[in-house]
Image (tube, rainbow, N blue to C red):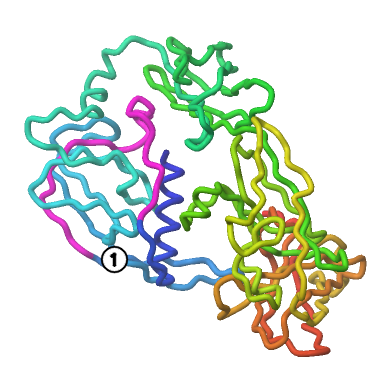
Amino acid sequence: MRVVIKLLFLISFFQLALGVGHACSCGGPGPVCSIQLGTSSIFRGTVIERTLIENVQMMKQPDGTSRRVVGNKKFVVRFAVQETFSGEANSEAVVYTAQQSAACGFPFAVGREYVVFTYQHEGELWTSHCTRTTLLEPGVENAAVVWMRNWSKAPSGSEIFGSVLLPPDSGRTTVPATVRLDGPERRDVVTDEEGKYSVKHLRAGEYTVSAQLPDGFATQPPFKAIVADKGCAGVNWWVTYEGHVRGRVSDVDGRPVADQRLELKRPKDASAGFPRVSDSVTTLLDGSYEFKHVSPGEYVVAIRGAGALTEEGASTIYYPHSNTVEEAQIIKLGASATADQVNFVLARLRTTVPVVVRVVMPDGSAAPAGLELFAFPNNSKPGEPSRSAITDSTGVATLPLFAGKDYSISVALDRNHPMCGNGLRMVVSEGMEAGVLSIPNLEACRR
């Protein structure tokens, strides 16, 4: 829990330091019994002082130097401690929290009583909206406080529990599954009719938890869960049908159309103009696409932003080739079934300019074949597509870009890895070469 919260804090700090305003979003803490007592400071206390101060960090640069980064301000909150549940017992405690709710800051009020769950950050105790920190109302029992008070007297033994559930639009809530635990001891348990399971009286330690499902269903890989004595871990399994919708997008001459966005929607949502989309994908360099883990039901497939690639001007083209959902072909998909050859043919494609980019290693030698370049349009209208290309054996890639457009070009090992190296920015014109893009060693690009 402390690692997750620390990461969330750092993300929030960077967003606000860069002037990016987003509402706080977090999955929230697990069940109260998953608290690892003794690993952090947890106490019940009353706020006696709250002071707003500047929040400054020294951030390391790639060249080894450091620079001063000023983020949003933070509150220093001083508590009179009435009860300590974990960590060192003191009569007072000082805790930090972000000023802004967008950075998950917790809204402490002077004179009010709280149960405070903290985590360490650079030698300071911090808390946030994403922890179990809670305002305590007079005369109202708090479940976390009750559990921590009774922990020392609880019988030995741990518990791992959770649910095996299908997505809400799948037409059913769960499938029969067997959950297996491998660790200090091995247990198998079958989920009940609501998809829930619970394994109690376990020895403490690390367990590998996996879910075995009927054919035609899929879920996430095995999960590592660590449980302390008298503690617990909640492990939920989100199950999908193994349905697929596949096809290809090409022009009238059979040439593939890459980097085109497609959406899979329920007909009733599309006809009602609802923005809800079951899934979205982008065509690969060979023009192919695939929607995976599709639940049974009726669907339409649409090309979004087609006007950015064609001269027809239509914002949406439904399969096989219509501008309205009423004329679209309905794709009926059974449980874990596959619909193949859902192909689009686009006419009157906009003319592109082939822009050559050479990718090199730090020593100036050619980068290997198979790296993927991405050109992202700057200051573009909604729907303007990014474009991509693959380097050949000489480290050269040719990007099909639109003349007059401003692009930023980056490179990655593939679509599953982050961008690496120095990017390029340019406005496209006929007959131009973008130039040279350098990358660090390939190991750095894999991180």
In this rendering, position of residue 310 left or right of residue 300: right
Question: 327 or 130: which is nearer to us?
Answer: 327
Q: Is residue 232 above or below residue 54?
A: above
Could you tell me which residue is drawn at 40 percent across and 47 percent down? 26
Q: Is residue 291 above or below residue 42?
A: below
Q: Quadrant of the C terminus?
A: bottom right
Q: Give x and y (percent) for residue 354.
A: 82, 80
The outermost residue toward the right is: 393
> Does the magenta-highlighted stretch encompass residue 36?
yes
For the question of whether residue 48 can be seen, the reply is yes
Could you tell me which residue is drawn at 65 percent across and 58 percent down? 318
In this rendering, position of residue 54 left or right of residue 342: left
Amino acid type indicated by mark 1: Lys
Local packing at callout 1 (Cα closer than 10 Å; few below 14, some 14-19, many 20+) is some
Numbered-mark total: 1
Question: 205 or 165: which is nearer to us?
Answer: 165
In this rendering, position of residue 324 left or right of residue 112: right
For the question of whether residue 179 can be seen, the reply is no
Could you tell me which residue is drawn at 53 percent across and 29 percent down? 237
Q: Quadrant of the N terminus?
A: top left
The magenta-colored residue range is: 24-52
Q: Give x and y (percent) for residue 147.
A: 26, 23
> Does the magenta-highlighted stretch encompass residue 366?
no
Q: Is residue 199 above or below residue 100?
A: above
Q: Is residue 339 above or below residue 346?
A: above
The outermost residue toward the front is: 327
In this rendering, position of residue 140 left or right of residue 435: left
> Residue under circle 1?
73
Label 1 SS: loop
Q: Give x and y (percent) for residue 433.
A: 81, 85
Question: 164 or 343: which is nearer to us?
Answer: 343
Question: 209 or 283: which is nearer to us?
Answer: 283
